[in-house]
Amino acid sequence: GAVVSQHPSRVICKSGTSVKIECRSLDFQATTMFWYRQFPKQSLMLMATSNEGSKATYEQGVEKDKFLINHASLTLSTLTVTSAHPEDSSFYICSARGSGGPNRETQYFGPGTRLLVL
Amino acid sequence: DAKTTQPTSMDCAEGRAANLPCNHSTISGNEYVYWYRQIHSQGPQYIIHGLKNNETNEMASLIITEDRKSSTLILPHATLRDTAVYYCIVRVGGTSYGKLTFGQGTILTVHP
């Protein structure tokens, strides 16, 4: 299957700082990328959907000014958690869907980024 | 997208087949059935998907009932590394690609 990478895999930051997480599709062009969040012992919750070159669409209850998403190219999307607080500590997972062939129908997920805000 | 119902947990002996059921009684004609799994502290891994025909790949087989209201994921020879949470998701396909919405899934434990 297609490969999606995330960087960093783990980050610890101080409260009030901003953190950027990168998501890359390594062997296909991702027209659509998704960002999920997963708290301990819970399922994945979709935060937002982004199409290359367009503004992201956020799910209800997700603050767009706090979670900035940029999808500037077909292989890269970034999520910036601005003014992070301890309650933002979570496992952030990106996903990508391609523009053609089997990658058009299937979402592939990155390995996740564990964020700890102190 | 239609909702799915899965058992909370299942056990399977190593080397035996693991059969994971999923009910999706409100599935629409243009919705596909997708299966993903998530091993602890990792991102979900795509397993297989189908619309109405049974599907098989190197990882698993997907059996969809004729009325499409339920399906079964089969891992033919489960190993300890197959221990994970398995998610059954239905999603619109075709020209309008819906988003994947995760439920609680089934915790599959493969034991020696």
Image (cartoon, coloured by chain):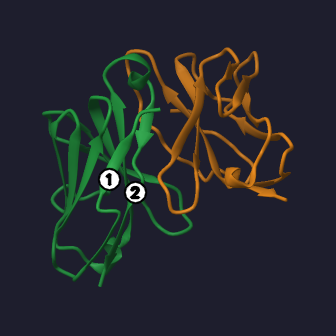
Residue B108: image tag: none
Q: Which structural element holds mark 1?
A: strand
Task: Name the image quarter holding the C terminus of chain A.
Answer: bottom left
In this rendering, is residue A20 above or below B43?
below
Q: Is residue B38 left or right of residue B21?
A: left
Q: Which structural element holds mark 2?
A: loop
Q: Is residue B76 left or right of residue A22?
A: right
Which residue occupies the foreground of this view, B12 or B102? B12
Residue wearing tag 2: A112
What is the crowding at mark 1: few (fewer than 14 residues within 10 Å), some, or many (at least 20)? Answer: many
Find chain B in the image and tell me its colour.
orange
In this rendering, is residue A90 above or below B2?
below
Q: Is residue A20 left or right of residue A3?
A: left
Which residue occupies the foreground of this view, B31 or A76? A76
Q: Quadrant of residue A71?
A: top left
Tell me what residue is drawn at x 49 percent, y 57 percent: B42
Tell me what residue is drawn at x 45 percent, y 29 percent: A106
Find chain A in the image and tell me its colour.
green
Q: Chain of mark 1?
A: A
For the question of whether residue A60 can be seen, the reply is no
Residue contact between numbered discs 2 and 1, judged by CB atoms under 8 Å = yes
For the question of whether residue A80 can be seen, the reply is yes
Residue wearing tag 1: A6
In this rendering, is residue B28 above or below A1?
above
